[in-house]
Each structure stands twice: as structure tokens, then as C-alpha cells.
Image (cartoon, helix red, strand yellow):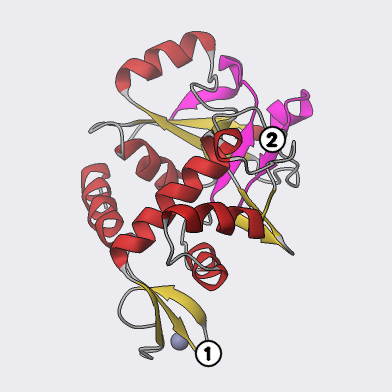
Amino acid sequence: MCLNELIRFIRSVNNIADTMIRKCPKHGYFRGEVCQCGEEGKYVLDTERTERMGRFISGGLRHFPDDLGLGMNQHGWVDIDVLIDVMMTRYPWASENRLIGLVESDVKERYQIDGNKIRARYGHSIDVDMDFPENDLPELFYGVSQEEADMIMEIGIRPVRQRYVHMSTTYEKAVEAASVHTEDPVIFKVDAFTAMNDGIVMMKANELIVLSEEIPPEYLEVIKV
Ligand SMILES: [Zn+2]
């Protein structure tokens, strides 16, 4: 598949990625009309409310927890009951079951639940101190526009409007992430092995995304396609 075909494919998939939530008795929460096993399952939340709840928790857990009075700790954790109470003042249909359904059916694994706490795994603009396990992949990927690429070759990758630099664990995921912002992405390969040996901290937020502080240009190489 060439790069342009890949981008078209990714866009078509993303358009249908966030849709209604249902629950399969065998496989748990899923997005869409039927589970992978063919089972219809039980209705949990429609597409519009899934999007609204998604936007609400993204805002609360990544950008303005204090405005909502969520009482977030330094590692980004918030009490689930507090989040649901606040959410219900705006969306009376919100519930713990629906929130958990949204988190567990999310193919991008944006959120993490641990006991009675919830947090965003990545995407923070506020100053959090995330404590994920160390990255164990020797190479990572980062996609940008052509203009950004020229600057990155000179100054490296810096977190822009975000607490951390977000790298992808695969080339395809980097293309996907960059395609949201640019028609013609440039993909960097990051020498994570050497960078980490040199003391740059890289953390695995989930199977798709690794977070780090600033990455100097000597660890970066443009992948030619
Ligand atoms: Zn199923």
C-alpha cells in the first residue's frame, strides 16, 4: 500500500471509529452495530452521546480539571465518582456503566481506569507527571507536516501545546496521527534505544503511544518512502 492509499484508508476508518457503544455478553463493550463475533449485544450509548461524553472527559482529564473541580492528582488521576457527579450536572444520562463502556471500547485506549480512579493516558496540555512503564521499543515514529519537519531537523521534537512529545510505536500509526493535520506527512524514525541510553525518559502510555520530553535532532532520521 502506498502512502496516499494508506492515508485514504485511515481517514475512512476514522470516520466510523467513534460510534455507538454496545455490550457483548462474551466480549464486553464494543463500538458499532455488532460485535466481532456477530452478536448484537445490549445497547449502552448512541453515537451522539458517545461523542459528547468523549469530548467532556477529554476536556476534563486533559485540559481543565481544575475548572470542573475534579481534584486531579499529580499523575493525572481523578475519582470516578467525582467525574460522574460533575458530568451528570451537564448530562443527566451519564452513568458509571456508560463511562466504563466508553473507556473499554475505545480502540485508541485514550483512558485508563484503576479501581475507583480514571485518567487520560496521553494528550494532556496541563502539567501532569505521568508514571507509565519505560518504553521497550528500540525505534519509534513521529509524523509531521513538511514545514514542521524542516524545523525539527534543526531543533528536534518539542512538546507543542502538550505536556509531552507523543510518538507512535509503528510507522502506520505515525502516518495516521499526522494525517489528521496534514495531507502530505513526513515521518521521522526516532532512535529510542540510543536516546534512552543517553538519559531521555520515554514511557509507554499504551500499545500505540510513547511519551517523552524533548528529543534532540541527533536521534531523528526522516524515513524516505
Ligand atoms: Zn462478541
Q: Say if the magenta span includes residue 206.
A: yes
Q: In which quarter of the image is the C terminus?
A: top left
Which residue is drawn at the image coordinates 63% and 47% (left, top)?
205
Residue segment shown in magenta: 193-222
- What is the x, y in percent for residue 193? 69, 34
| Ligand 1 contact, mark 1 (Cβ < 8 Å) | yes
Q: Can residue 37 be seen in this view?
A: yes
Q: Say if the magenta span includes residue 224.
A: no
Query: Relative to residue 27, is residue 161 depicted above or below?
Result: above
| Quadrant in the rendering for residue 220 | top right
The circle on residue 202 is: 2
- What is the x, y in percent for residue 88? 49, 58
Which residue is drawn at the image coordinates 54% and 34% (left, top)?
64
Q: Name the residue under label 1.
A: 26
| Quadrant in the rendering for residue 3 | top left
- What is the x, y in percent for residue 53? 42, 56
